[in-house]
Every structure is written in structure tokens, then in C-alpha cells.
């Protein structure tokens, strides 16, 4: 296996690194929207994968089965009739895939997102509330849309427009099924979503809860109540977990020593970074790096 650091991957690199056959043996679809059966993942991916960032977005639809997927600092349990959206640039890892899982993987290049998400607020909400359960009837409807997308080929007129229209309808169906979260969130939900978005953008330079409370124009106490209510974790824990996740990606690169990783994350004291990393992961940064590379070599 290549030792290249693939912390940011294209679809081709993902296939090359995490599927059990090289990318040149994989049949990539040539359409703007690519839809693949989830049974491919069951047969050809051996979880858990390391943390990575994708240069693309994707949707997972589970007709049967499920598994576990890490998205940023959350590990999500996935079951039949769940929909998961992961936006480009966000940390994720495949923790497990249940035997017999059936469904669809929908690959979305970033240029398509404005055409699929006419409402940018809905895109942001789905980014930070990525998992949604729908009814069996709604999942069957979503599956039919996937089959219709697959039926469109590049030789047909308006194929791309039809694919994007079908995807837009699918996103709206998911929003309809999760109206409270995605369409009409209450104030605590909106504050929590905006907090998570700000942490994603600023955690490397700002790790004080006060910074985020000021940015949201709320008190620290109110921010704590909102985030605790929705996530069962205080804001400080979200901030710490996110910076440790960022550090795990940097630690995959063996050309960086531990002090360099600490500096990139704006830790004034590398020894403090090491203590914090161990407090969260029960490993030192060096132990994590060694375990990571040992896992790749097996």
C-alpha cells in the first residue's frame, strides 16, 4: 500500500486506498451525478478506515443494514431507512458496515451543490445535522429516484438537468421528513448548528467558548444550555474533540514531528498538546501515529 498521506482524497484516491482493488480496475460512472450500490462497500471495504477529508460531497441511503460512520467529532449509528449526508472537507471515517447492507452511495461534485440546494440554509443545516431517519415508504421513494438517476445517460438530452432535479427532490423529501431540524429549527437547534459551523471554521485559532458565544451574540450560559440540550455535550468538549481530530489527520504525515503538529494547531506548548491528546484518546501522539501506520501495514 502506498505511504502517501491521503488525508484529503478524491473519489479515485478513495477507491485506490480503501477498496480492495486499485482505481484502474474500478468502473467509474461518467455522469455528473454518480450512484453506486452500497453492497460494493460491504464486499470491498475493510473498516475501520482512518480519518480522511473528501474533496467531494456524498449521500448514503440505507435500505437495509447499516453500520457506523464518524463525521467530524461524532460517531453515528446507521440503520435501515437512514440517510447520511457528508459535505466536502469534513473529517469522516468508516467505522463499520453491517453484513447484508443494501442501499445507495451518491457522489456529488461540489459544483453541483448550488443546483441541488437552492436554499443555502438547508445545505448548512444538513451539513451539521447529517443523519436523518425517514419512513420505509419515503426510503422506497428515494430509492426509486436513485434508479431514475441511474437510467439517465450522457447521450440523452438534458440528462444532467434531470439528475440534478431528481436530487433536489430527494433533498427536499429528506427535509420534509425532518422538518423540525431542517426546515423550521427552534432557537436552540439553530444556535447549536451555527456553533458547530463556527467551530469547524475557527477551531485552529479559537478554542475559548467565549469567542463562539460572542460570535453568536449570546451568553456563554445560554450557549452551554443550547449545545448540551441538543448534543449532550458541552461546547468545550466539542471544541476539544474537533482540535484532536484535526491533529489526528496531521499525525498521519510522518514528515511532521509532534512539535510541528502542535504549532500548526496553534498550541504554544507542545507538551500541553501531548497531555490534551492523551487525555482525550488515552494515547500519546506518538503512540497514535505508530498504531495508525501499523494498521495500514497489516
Image: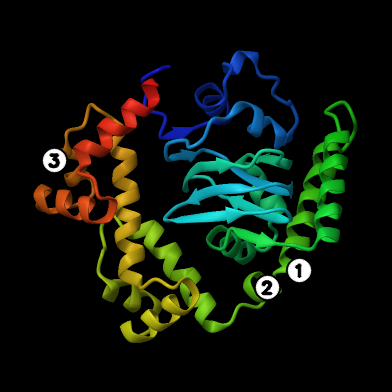
Task: Judge depth for marks 3 and 2 and give the one in front.
Answer: 3
| Residue of label 1 | 176
| Residue of label 3 | 259
How far is the residue under mark 1 from the one under mark 3? 48 Å
How far is the residue under mark 1 from the one under mark 2? 7 Å
* Residue 98: x %, y % from top left: 63, 42
Residues at marks 3 and 2 touching, judged by CB atoms closer than 8 Å: no
Q: Is residue 137 above or below residue 147?
A: below
Query: Quadrant of the image for the N terminus?
Result: top left
Q: Nearer the viewer, residue 21 or 99?
A: 99
Chain-order first, disc 1 or disc 3 = 1
* Residue 240: x %, y % from top left: 29, 60
* Residue 54: x %, y % from top left: 51, 39
Residues at marks 1 and 2 touching, judged by CB atoms closer than 8 Å: yes
Decide if residue 33 is in sight here: no
Q: Which mark is residue 24?
A: none
Q: Which mark is residue 183?
A: 2
Q: Is residue 210 above or below residue 242?
A: below
* Residue 243: x %, y % from top left: 30, 54
Amino acid at each position: 500500500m502506498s505511504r502517501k498521506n491521503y488525508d484529503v482524497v478524491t473519489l479515485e484516491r478513495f477507491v485506490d486506498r480503501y477498496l480492495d482493488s486499485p482505481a484502474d480496475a474500478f468502473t467509474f460512472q461518467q455522469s455528473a451525478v454518480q450512484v453506486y450500490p452500497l453492497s460494493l462497500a460491504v464486499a470491498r471495504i475493510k473498516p475501520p478506515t482512518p480519518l480522511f477529508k473528501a474533496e467531494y460531497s456524498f449521500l448514503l441511503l440505507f435500505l437495509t443494514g447499516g453500520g457506523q460512520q464518524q463525521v467530524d467529532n461524532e460517531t453515528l449509528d446507521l440503520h435501515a431507512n437512514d440517510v447520511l449526508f457528508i459535505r466536502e472537507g469534513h473529517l469522516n471515517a468508516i467505522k463499520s458496515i453491517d453484513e447484508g447492507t443494501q442501499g445507495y452511495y451518491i457522489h456529488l461534485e461540489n459544483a453541483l451543490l448550488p443546483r441541488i440546494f437552492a436554499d443555502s440554509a438547508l445545505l448548512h443545516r444538513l451539513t451539521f445535522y447529517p443523519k436523518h431517519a425517514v419512513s420505509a415508504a419515503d426510503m422506497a421513494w428515494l430509492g426509486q429516484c436513485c434508479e431514475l438517476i441511474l437510467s439517465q445517460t450522457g447521450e440523452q438530452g438534458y440528462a444532467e438537468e434531470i439528475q440534478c432535479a431528481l436530487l433536489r427532490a430527494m433533498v427536499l423529501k429528506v427535509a420534509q421528513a425532518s422538518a423540525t431540524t431542517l426546515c423550521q429549527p427552534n432557537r436552540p437547534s439553530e444556535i447549536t448548528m451555527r456553533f458547530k459551523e463556527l467551530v469547524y471554521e475557527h477551531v485552529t485559532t479559537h478554542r475559548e467558548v467565549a469567542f463562539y458565544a460572542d460570535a453568536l451574540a449570546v451568553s456563554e450560559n445560554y450557549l452551554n444550555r443550547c449545545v448540551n440540550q441538543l448534543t449532550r455535550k458541552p461546547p468545550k468538549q466539542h471544541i476539544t474533540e474537533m482540535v484532536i481530530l484535526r491533529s489526528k489527520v496531521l499525525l498521519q504525515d510522518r514528515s511532521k514531528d509532534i512539535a510541528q503538529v502542535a504549532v500548526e494547531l496553534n498550541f504554544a506548548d507542545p507538551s500541553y498538546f501531548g497531555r490534551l491528546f492523551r487525555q482525550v484518546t488515552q494515547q500519546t501522539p506518538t503512540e497514535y501515529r505508530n498504531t495508525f501506520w501499523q494498521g495500514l501495514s497489516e
